[in-house]
Structures are given as structure tokens and as C-alpha cells.
Image (tube, rainbow, N blue to C red):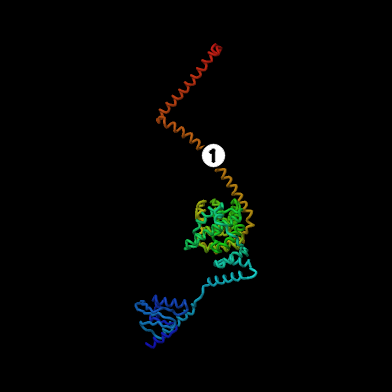
Amino acid sequence: MEENKSETARDSSGVKPNPKDETNGACSSPEDQKITNKGTSDGDHLAETGKEVEDRCNGEIYKKKDFSEGQKVEDVTGSSSENDASETAEKTMKRRKKRPKNVSQEAQDRQKKMQQIQDVLSSTPLDLEVLRKLAIGDGGLIKDELRRKAWPRLMMIEHMEVTPKPTLDTIKSHKDYQQVVLDVNRSLKRFPPGIDDDYRLVLMDQLTTLIIRILMKHPELNYYQGFHDVAITFLLVMGEDVGYEMVEKLSVTHLSEFMRPTMEKTTYYLTYIYPILRRADTKLYQFLIDSGVGTVFCLPWLITWFAHTLSDYRNVVRLYDCFLASPYLMPMYIAAAIVLHKKEDVLAGECDMAMQHYILSQVPDTLPLERILVDAGELYNLYPPDTLQEEANEFLQKKAEEEKLEKQQVLERRKKFEAARRGQNYRGILATVFRYLPLVPAQRNMLVKVAAFAVTAYIATSLYSYYSNSALVFPFVAKR
């Protein structure tokens, strides 16, 4: 017996099998299972520190000592034949050989793409098309460290212009200062969770200054609510100085149409979602048209690049990777892809404007973003913007006519209401008079008769007096 135990302990597995393995297979002891699982996953022997664990398995008590590489695990209960022990040990070794420690495929792909981005950024000259494909492709630019290098290249900003910051008094004197401060104070959810309060206040001051500097440099631009959501994203990723340069360029390129005095051009861009939906899914398109939901639900998606809608910072910067590398109207194709993704929820709801607006405006952070981006790219390739312009113009014209008709109907209803209110005031006066009159209908009728008799008597007296005076002045009247 001692000889058998000695040979078993020398076995490379380091574990002596249970005699009941012949009937029950591997021992069902939880601690045995833990040892086997961890050993097979790591590909090495376990390493622990000096405690003993007792466990009960099939009515027998096992005592296992922690061990490091080269140490032994001894079973103090029962005994088995040397052949059984050798077979079990051999099987254990085979299992361990089949499960080497490997890096996940996802991590390998991520590392590979990071290296590709680094290679493109360090190449001379820069291959901008390859960088754009990497930014749009799965995972985007991976992390902020790479974004700080790639985003300026995607916007073709080669040299940063260092401009002096205006004084605090100059910033406070700007006409939009109070509105910007209000919006910045409402953007607390956009800052990283757990951020120090003092540092957050510093970032808020930097954000306010950044926005006012842009408005001062371009007085023709008009600030809109949501512009701060875009600016804060670049502030968090790029820092104050570089963030200012990038947002300033965005304000005269991608976002310039949203900063006009009117929303006419913004409304025009929003209408593109319906020609896309009509071609992609006729049933869904008609349902939304019948509901009258319009395009207001996707307004914040467009003018803030989803920064106001999504609360997960990682999703926001991932979308910004795509937008900076894509044509200006790509946000509307992503909006269409999201609506198509929510098709079941939309059709399951009531065909009502309020209900559909609520359903469509809810964009959870659990959205399959990479799938959405792929679908949006396919929609863009199938239905490019130049093929949708005519239908977008028709849709906008039809909408304008409907709005005009609706205004006329509202005006007519308002006139009727005013007329009804005047009539109601007249009836109110009568009601006030009758409040002081007898409430019994018979008495009220008698009073009316008395009033009519009094009026008649007054008229008769007046006529008599008139003719009597005429006879005195003009005698020929009396002769007649």
C-alpha cells in the first residue's frame, strides 16, 4: 500500500484518484472539482498557502493540503489499485494539455486594431482613407489615447493655433453667457461618474469659456441648446486648448447649419429620415406617417450627435469616431437604423403621435451600437443623400402646406371661440339681471307683461303730447 501511494504521488497530475471513480466517474467533491478546473484552465499546478480544507464526498472525508508546483496532494482515505491511479492521472494530464491558457480572440483583435491605428498615425504621408475606415469600423478608435491623436487628423487640423483667452469680464458680457451657463449647469450627467467636485467645477468653467470664445470669434453663429453637449465631449477627450480648436472648426463645418438664425436647414436635414424609411420598410414608414409623429423625436440626435441622448460615455465617443470620419448626413442614417431596430416596439404601440414620440425618443445604452453602425453604412450605400433630395424637398413642401392648413384651422377655431365668448358674456349679463328678478317663471312672465304695458303707455303718451303741441302751433292741423 505504501508503495502504491508513493508511486501515485509521483504522478505528474499530483492527485490520487478515488476508488469510487470506477463506478461514479470523477469524484463529486466540490474542492476536487475546484482543483481540477483551476488546474486545467491555467495549465499549471495550483499554488496556495498552508491551509487544509475538509470536504465530504459520498460519505468519505477527504483532506487536501494546499500545494505549489512540484508539491503533492495526498488522499488519506481508502486505496485503489496502481493501474486505476495511473489511468486517472493520465486522463487528467490529457485534459490539461487540451486547455492551455489563451488570450481571448476579442482581446487579440482589439490589440491588432490598436496596432493598425498606431501604424497609420505614424506613417508619412498619412493615409486618411485608411484612418477613416478604422474609425468607422468595429470598435472605432478603441481608446481616448488614440482619439487624441486621430481626431485632429480626421478633421485635417495639422497645426493648432494658440489664441489668447478673453478676460472673465468679456466672457460675462456676451449676450449668450447666461444661457450657456444654464445649459452647462444642466449637463452634470455628461461628466464622468465619481469625478471630484472641484475638478468638475473647473471643467464647467472651461466649457463655458470654450463656447463663448467660439461665439465671439464667429459672431454670425447663433448658439443653440445642445451645442454644449458636443463641446463637452471634445473637452473631456482632447482637453481645453485642442478641444477649442476642434469645436471651433466643427461649428463652421458639420454644425454650421444648426447655428443659423432659423431652423429651416435643420428641419430640412431631419426630413431625410422618411425617404430612407420609405425605401427600407414601407410598412413602418406608413405607420409613422399615419401617427403624425413627425421628426421632432430625432432632433436632439442630429444637433448633439446623440451626446444628449446616450448616457454612456463610451457609446458617445464611439459615435463621434464615426461622425468625424463620415459625411455630414450620417447622423440621419444612424437615426433611421435605430428606428428600424425599434420596429417591433413601434408597431406594437398605438398609432398616436404622443405614444410614438415616447417610444422613439427612448434610446437605451444597451443598444447594439456596432450593428446599428453597420446597418447605417449599408443604408447610406443603398440610398445616398443625392438620391433623396427630391423626395426630401417634396416631403418638406407637403409638411409646410399641412402646417399652413393647420394654422388656418386654428385661426378659424379661435374666431369661433371669440364669438362664443362674446355671446357668453351677453348671456352672462342677462343672467346677472335675472338674478335679482323673481325666480318663479309665472312671476317673471307677469313682470315682462307689466314692462311691455309700461313701454306701450310711454309711447302713447309721447305721441299724444306731440300732436297736442302741434295743434297749438299749427292751427290748420287741428282743423283737419
Q: Quadrant of residue 381?
A: bottom right
Q: Quadrant for the C terminus, please.
A: top right
Task: Give the camera-side residue of 78 and 124.
Answer: 124
147 is higher (above) or lower (below) than 401 = below
Q: Residue furthest bottom?
A: 3
| Viewer can see residue 303 | no
Q: In the picture, residue 389 is in which quadrant?
A: bottom right
In percent of width and height, residue 428 lies at 46, 34
Q: Residue 239 location, x and y as percent? A: 55, 63
Question: What element does badge 1 sit on?
Answer: helix
Instruction: Give 190 or 212, whichever is nearer the viewer.
Output: 212
Instruction: Say what amino acid the circle numbered 1 marks.
Output: Lys
Q: Quadrant of residue 317?
A: bottom right
From the top left corner, tell me how far across and down residue 128 is, in percent. Answer: 63, 66
Query: Is 462 positioned to the left or the right of 34 in the image?
Result: right
Counting from the top left corner in percent of width and height, residue 280 is at 58, 58
| Identity of the residue furthest to the top in this view | 479
Q: Is residue 433 left or right of residue 215?
A: left
Q: Residue at x 61, y 67 (%)?
A: 131
**Quadrant the N terminus occupies:** bottom left
Q: Which residue is mark 1?
A: 415
Judge whether 228 appears above or below 91 on screen.
Answer: above
The residue lying at 49 percent from left, 80 percent from top is: 97
Residue 58, above or below 342: below
Is residue 15 visible in the rendered image? The answer is yes
Q: How many marks?
A: 1
- Please name the residue shown 63% across and 70% down the image: 123
Q: Does residue 390 appear to the left or right of 284 in the view shown?
A: right
Mark 1 residue crowding within 10 angstroms, few (<14) / some (14–19) / many (20+): few
